[in-house]
Amino acid sequence: MKQNMNIASLLPEVAARLKDRTAVIVPVRRGADGRMEYESRTFGQLDAESDKYAHGLATMGIGRETRTLLMVRPGFDFIALTFAIFKVGAAPVLIDPGMGRSNLLDCVKNARPEAFVAIPLAHLARKIYPRHFGSVKHLVTVGRRWLWGGQTLESLRAMGEGKGAFLPAMAEAEDMAAILFTTGSTGVPKGVVYNHGIFINQARMIGEQYSITENDRDLPAFPLFALFSISLGMSVVIPRLDPTNPGKADPAQIVEEIIDNQVTFTFGSPAIWKNVSRYCVRNKVKLPSLKRVLMAGAPVPNSIHNALLNHILPEDARTYTPFGATESLPVCDMEGAEALAEAASPSTQRMGICVGRPLPGMSVKIIRITEEPVEEWDGFLDLPQGKIGEIVVSGPVVTKEYFELPDHTRMAKIRDPKNGDIMHRMGDVGYLDEKGRLWFCGRKAHRVVTPEDVMFTIPCEAVFNQHSAVARSALVGLGPRPVQRPVIIVELDKIRPHADEEKIAEELLILAAKSRLTLHIKDVLFHPEFPTDIRHNAKIFREKLKVWAEKQLPHLVPKEAV
């Protein structure tokens, strides 16, 4: 008998074991005593509700590989609907709502969704911009429906009342399961095609790597991670934060939810944990239940690891910085304790940020930097240990294509002729050390190429980030490669008092002159607040800063750029 690889099958399997255990906890209101009140659903209730939605979707004609654009806020309905879409064999299309109107509409148009399950505000956008939603045939409103027709969540549920369990549609490992859009932090957002096998491999790898048990309770700051948590039998506490701006989350609320619900596990952006760790240290708050903190999406400063491990979490707790991308996650992992030990070693003067060793089953290679496609893997591409190049990964969680973007797929994928496997070019640069660990040095697109040198963002910015007045810095190059003029842009720390910008600039140029990495930098600019990506609030849009810098220093832009 052929095994059903539908990722949706994991929910009824977990619900059969944990029927009466709490699956989802949602903060709803403050009580008269000022304490937060929560609503919850069990795994049995979640699976049953998902079954009703699946019956309703199937009745509407939504079935195998129907691209279903889902725009629903994180919570019980989001989880139940996503599993329902998987159960009928359809493919949810997930787009970051905060990537900007133009990018979002382009993503919708490119995905050509056939079904649209969304809150009223998203349906209103469909009416305002009809040409981007021209492919949609089926409508479901999660909330109050106005004049646009289709079904409501209540009517969808009613279609499934009394019909019992919904048997998940049969799916092969290679069948399309979902389309997840990148944020477009370096280029246009692209729809990454996930198949069911990749989702199942991700769930397995995450569960094994972080020793997740059914006694764990998760607070997922990335909404999509809640689906993995449920699949692994973890209870999920939905945090009160705006998914379009997680870095602005109130740290007091995050701490309250962790303490109220005895959260043991969490996965979120370092932008969130920077604020939470500062809040806890300042207010002498401990989080005794929290045993594992995963931070991803951008480099994690050692100051966050230090605050969590030495001041906030219990002694047996661990912090992790998994490394990967929408196209391949997870790839590597690094424990905070090892990162702190590496930084404390006086004999170690590394370039970049160590993101750890490849997970079991994953392979990492470094190839020479090129802007050309690489059709097939050949050993001559390999760079030796310690040499910075483009990071290429392979393994069971590597996706094979972008949805209907063959040129982008060709640029990002390499076929291994020995076994037919697809390798992914991460678009990141880095190197492997003598211990087999990967060091991240920035995005390939962000490197600055001058007549004298090739400069990489993360190592260069580290020179300036050591200054006490600097919150973060960004290396950009004025003009085109290979004649760029390097400039460092600084965002000052708003919490600490500091001297005037002219004095800080002088001190930063002194630091620059002392390092071989930055000795060619002669210009410093100050920016009030860096533009960053929506998903993590941590990836710096250096492309936008480059344009801004060229306007600030037009007389320094190399003539070839005019």
Image (cartoon, grey):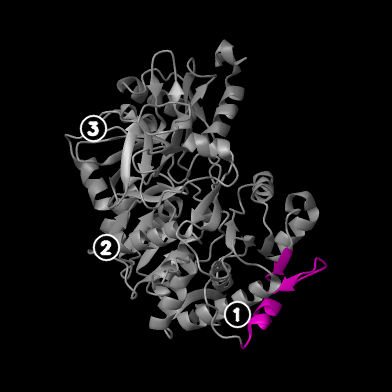
Q: How far apart are marks 2 and 3 (CA)?
A: 28 Å
Crowd band around label 1 with a 10 angstrom C-alpha radius: few (<14), some (14–19), many (20+) = many
Residue 505: which quarter of the image? top left
Magenta segment boundaries in residue numbering: 138-162
- Name the secondary structure under disc 3: loop
Which badge, 2 or 3, is on the more N-terminal residue? 2
Image mark for residue 52? 1
Seen as rendered, the residue at the extreme bottom is 162
Give the structural element (helix, strand or loop) at label 2: loop
In front of the other: 331 or 170 = 170
Q: Name the residue under label 3.
A: 349
Q: Who's the residue at 71% across and 74% down the image?
A: 152
Foreground: disc 1 or disc 2: 1
Question: Can you identify the residue that label 2 sits on?
Answer: 317
Q: How crowded is mark 2: few (under 14 residues within 10 Å), some or many (20 or more)?
A: some
Amino acid marked by disc 2: Ala
**In-image side of 187 versus 313 (left or right):** right
- In the image, residue 376 lies at what x, y percent? 41, 33
